[in-house]
C-alpha cells in the first residue's frame, strides 16, 4: 500500500510536534510502523491522505460508535456551528444533554460537563477527596484514567504501550496517595482498606478494563468493590469513559446492576467532539462550585457544538439495538479467533458488547500481569498484515478493538478474509 503522503506529513510533523503526534499511541511506534494521516471518515471506513481506504476498528478510540460522519450528527454540528462556536454562557443543549445522561443512568442525579475524560476523572477525584476529607485513592494496575498526575501510576493505554512505569514530571508525593491493586483482585483491595481504610477517599475502576486490551471483571469483583467502599466510607468511582453508552445505553453500571457514587464519561458522550462529564449523587455534586466549595471550571465546557454532537449521538443510541450489535460482534470475534487458532499461534479473544481484543497468549487474561504474557511480535505481524490489507486495528496490543453500529457483514467478511491470509 502506498503511504508516501502520510510519511511526508509525519516527517514534517516530527519536527513540529513531539513524536509527530498529539497523543502517543497514534505514532504506531510499538507496531514498528508510522501513522497514517487521515483525510476523511465515512461510516465504518477511513480514507488516508494517499487515497487508501480502511475498515476502521479504532473508531477514534471509542467515540464513533455510530460510525464516522453520521448524517444526523454532522447536521447537528453544522446547525450549531452556524449559530456560533462558543458563547461563554449557558446554552439549551447543555441542559438537554444532562437530562439525557441522567435519565439513562439513574446513579447520575447531577453532572458537570468538561472537555475530556482526563478532566472528568481528575475532577471526580477532587470531589471525592472533598466529600470524604481523605486523600488516598485506590486504582488498579493497567487501568487508564487519563493523564492527570494522580492516575499515572501503573496506568494502561499509552503508558502501558510505551512500557513507561510511571512518568517523570509527576511528584512522588502526588502518586504516594495512589494505592495500587491488581485488577480483579478483591483480596489485595481489601488488604489496602485494612491498612489505610480511614484515609481512602475513593476507588476508581474501569468496570470493564479497556486500556490494557480488554479485561472483563470477574463475577463478584465490582460487587465486592461496592461493598468495600460502603463499609469504609470511600466513594466508588466508575470510570465509564469507554463503557458509557457502549456496554449498554445505561453503561456498565446498568449492565452489571451496580450503583457507583460517581461516574466519569468521555468519548461517546461527545459524539466525536471533545467532551467529558462527571456526575453522581446530588448530595455530592452540589459540593461543586458555584453551588458548593469545590472549584472546577472550564472556558469551553458545555461548548454548543460539542453538546449538539453528543446530544445527536445519544438520541440515536437511545433506540439502537445494542444486543444485536453484541451478537454480531461476538460472532465476528469468534470467527477471527478460530482463524488465528488455525494458524498455530496462541490466541485469546475476549469480547463484550462491541469490543474485542486479540491477545497472542495461551491463558485467559484477567489482569495486567497476564497481558504481559502476550507475544507482542505476533501482534505486530498481525497489525502490519491487516493494515496492508486495508484493515485498521488499534496500533497496540494494549488497546481494544471497537465495532460500530454501521460495520457491515461485508466489513466483517473482508476482515476475516484478510486475517486468513496472515502468516506468522
Ligand atoms: C480515554 C480514557 C480516559 C481519558 O479520556 P481523554 O478524553 O483521553 O482525556 C479516561 N478513562 C478511560 C477509561 C479512558 O478510556
Image (tube, rainbow, N blue to C red):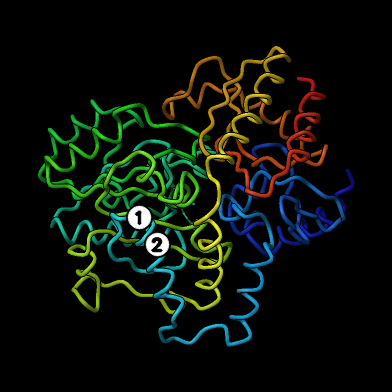
Residue 369 x %, y %:
43, 25
Task: Mark 2: give few (<14), some (14-19) or many (20+) Cα within 10 Å.
Answer: many
Residue 307 falls left or right of residue 169 = right
Residue identifier under label 2: 101
Q: Position of residue 135 (x, y in %)?
A: 19, 53
Q: Quadrant of residue 325?
A: top right
- Label 1–label 2 contact, CB within 8 A: yes
Residue in front for this viewpoint, 313 or 292: 313
Toward the viewer: 124 or 261? 261
Q: Quadrant of the N terminus?
A: top right
Q: What residue appears at the point 52 percent right and 66 percent down from the top-left corner?
A: 310
Q: Is residue 227 left or right of residue 206?
A: left
SS state under label 2: helix
Q: Quadrant of the C terminus?
A: top right
> Residue sitting at 58 percent across and 55 percent down?
23
Task: Return the residue at label 1.
Answer: 105
Residue 27 x/y as whole percent: 66, 49
Amino acid at each position: 500500500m502506498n503511504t508516501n503522503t502520510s510519511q511526508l506529513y509525519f516527517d514534517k510533523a516530527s519536527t513540529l510536534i513531539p513524536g509527530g503526534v498529539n497523543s502517543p499511541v497514534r505514532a504506531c511506534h510499538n507496531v514498528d510502523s508510522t501513522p497514517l494521516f487521515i483525510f476523511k471518515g465515512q461510516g465504518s471506513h477511513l480514507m488516508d491522505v494517499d487515497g487508501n481506504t480502511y475498515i476502521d476498528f479504532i473508531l477514534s478510540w471509542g467515540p464513533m460508535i455510530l460510525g464516522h460522519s453520521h448524517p444526523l450528527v454532522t447536521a447537528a454540528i453544522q446547525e450549531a456551528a452556524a449559530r456560533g462556536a462558543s458563547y461563554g454562557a449557558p446554552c439549551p443543549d447543555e441542559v438537554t444533554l444532562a437530562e439525557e445522561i441522567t435519565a439513562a443512568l439513574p446513579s447520575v442525579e447531577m453532572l458537570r460537563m468538561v472537555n475530556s475524560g482526563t478532566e472528568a476523572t481528575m475532577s471526580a477525584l477532587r470531589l471525592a477527596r472533598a466529600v470524604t476529607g481523605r486523600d488516598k485513592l485506590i486504582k488498579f494496575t493497567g487501568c487508564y484514567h487519563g493523564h492527570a498526575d494522580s492516575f499515572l501510576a501503573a496506568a494502561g493505554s499509552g503508558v502501558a504501550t510505551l512500557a513507561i512505569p510511571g512518568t517523570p514530571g509527576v511528584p512522588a508525593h502526588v502518586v504516594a496517595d495512589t494505592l495500587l491493586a491488581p485488577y480483579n483482585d478483591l483480596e489485595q483491595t481489601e488488604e489496602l482498606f485494612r491498612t489505610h481504610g480511614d484515609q481512602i477517599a475513593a476507588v476508581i475502576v474501569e468496570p470493564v478494563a479497556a486500556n490494557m486490551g480488554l479485561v472483563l471483571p470477574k463475577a463478584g469483583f465490582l460487587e465486592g468493590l461496592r461493598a468495600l467502599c460502603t463499609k469504609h466510607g470511600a466513594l466508588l468511582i466508575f470510570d465509564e469513559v469507554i463503557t458509557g453508552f457502549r456496554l449498554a445505553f445505561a453503561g456498565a453500571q446498568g449492565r452489571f446492576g451496580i450503583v457507583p457514587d460517581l461516574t466519569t464519561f468521555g468519548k461517546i458522550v461527545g459524539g466525536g467532539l471533545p467532551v467529558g462529564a462527571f456526575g453522581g449523587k446530588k448530595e455530592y455534586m452540589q459540593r461543586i462550585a458555584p453551588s458548593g466549595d469545590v472549584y472546577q471550571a472550564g472556558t469551553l465546557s458545555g461548548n454548543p457544538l460539542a453538546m449538539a454532537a453528543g446530544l445527536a449521538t445519544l438520541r440515536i443510541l437511545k433506540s439502537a439495538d445494542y444486543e444485536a450489535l453484541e451478537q454480531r460482534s461476538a460472532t465476528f470475534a469468534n470467527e477471527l479467533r478460530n482463524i488465528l487458532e488455525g494458524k498455530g499461534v496462541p490466541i485469546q479473544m475476549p469480547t463484550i458488547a462491541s469490543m474485542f481484543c486479540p491477545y497472542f497468549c495461551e491463558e485467559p487474561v484477567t489482569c495486567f500481569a497476564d497481558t504481559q504474557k502476550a507475544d507482542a511480535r505476533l501482534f505486530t505481524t498481525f497489525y502490519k498484515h491487516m493494515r496492508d490489507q486495508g484493515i485498521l486495528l488499534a496500533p497496540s496490543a494494549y488497546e481494544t478493538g471497537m465495532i460500530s453500529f454501521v460495520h457491515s457483514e461485508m466489513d466483517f467478511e473482508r476482515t476475516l478474509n484478510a486475517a486468513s491470509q496472515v502468516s506468522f
